Image: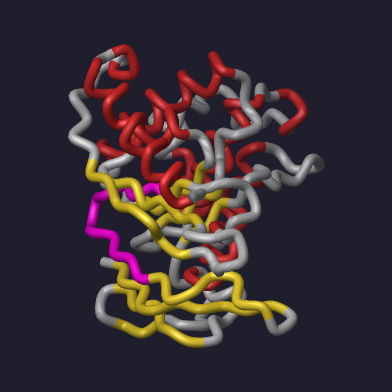
Amino acid sequence: MLECKNITKSYNGKTFIDNISLTVKRNELVCILGASGIGKSTLFNIISGIIPPDSGSVVLNGEDITGKIGRVSYMQQKDLLFPFKTVLSNVTLPLIIAGKNKKSACLQALEHFEAFGLSGCENKYPNQLSGGMRQRAALLRTYLIKNDLTLLDEPFSALDALTKRQMHEWYQSIRTKINLTTLFITHDVDEAVKLSDRILIIGKNKEDLPANIIAEIAIENVGGNDFELTPEFLEYKRKILDAISVAAG
């Protein structure tokens, strides 16, 4: 579905990410794992068309979308819900901006409130929701844009450990149910292993070099809520940490 080809981006004359290429298949969840500040969000901003690359291209379903906004759904780290709007008004906002009338937008959104675990929250305000519920609302808003590819930039990083675990289990369930194709940013190794079909590790081979993809690891998730307690899970973590360690020199 998605192919990024030789993406390079510089700031103030210094190359930040260099010659990055990646693919995402339909219904796949690919995780980009790397340290904070390494260039993950810069790559997402290029894929979403917010900023242009210095060189390289972004191709979605065979179409070159480099520098074009609105072709992918993009949820950033903060939920960005408007505090003065109800949950229903928040999640329908993209539909209304796109030209749909309010009644039709509300009906379309309400069809998904149960699946997203938001039943009964339609007329609540964001400050009346837990962190996990706010993220579900933000995810529903992102989903309603109905683009083929969803970019999630550390959507669960601000949640406590228990809520994060619950959100992981819920997201795995919902993405299978509604066939989401996802490119997911995190710096949490456990989260990457638990959620991903494939993990792309972004890093630097030397401190003064720009970031690139240094390893790719396919995850054969055995499933179940206790996957992170299995030997397979620990072996995936070891491979990831070894790859990061080698890159760090």
Residue 229 is drawn in which quadrant?
A: top left
In the image, 230 versus 13, the foreground residue is 13
Q: Is residue 106 visible?
A: no
In the image, 75 versus 230, the foreground residue is 230
Residue 233 is drawn in which quadrant?
A: top left
Whole-percent x and y of residue 54?
55, 86
Whole-percent x and y of residue 151?
47, 55
Residue 30 on the magenta span? yes
Extent of the magenta region: 21-31
Q: Is residue 6 visible?
A: yes
User: Which residue shows up at 24% across the image and 17% down it?
Assistant: 231
User: Which residue shows up at 31% across the image and 36% down it?
Assistant: 239
In the image, 161 versus 240, the foreground residue is 240
Image coloring type: secondary structure
Q: Is residue 106 above or below residue 227?
A: below
The secondary structure making up most of the magenta span is: strand
Q: Is residue 228 found left or right of 39 in the rendered image?
A: left
User: Which residue shows up at 47% across the image and 39% down it?
Assistant: 110
Q: Is residue 5 above or below residue 210?
A: below
Residue extending farthest right: 84
Q: Tag count in the figure?
A: 0
Residue 171 on the magenta span? no
Whole-percent x and y of residue 108?
44, 48
Question: On the rendered image, what quadrant is the N terminus found in?
Answer: bottom left
Q: Is residue 62 found left or right of 20 in the rendered image?
A: left
Whole-percent x and y of residue 124?
69, 28
User: Which residue shows up at 63% across the image and 45% down it?
Assistant: 77
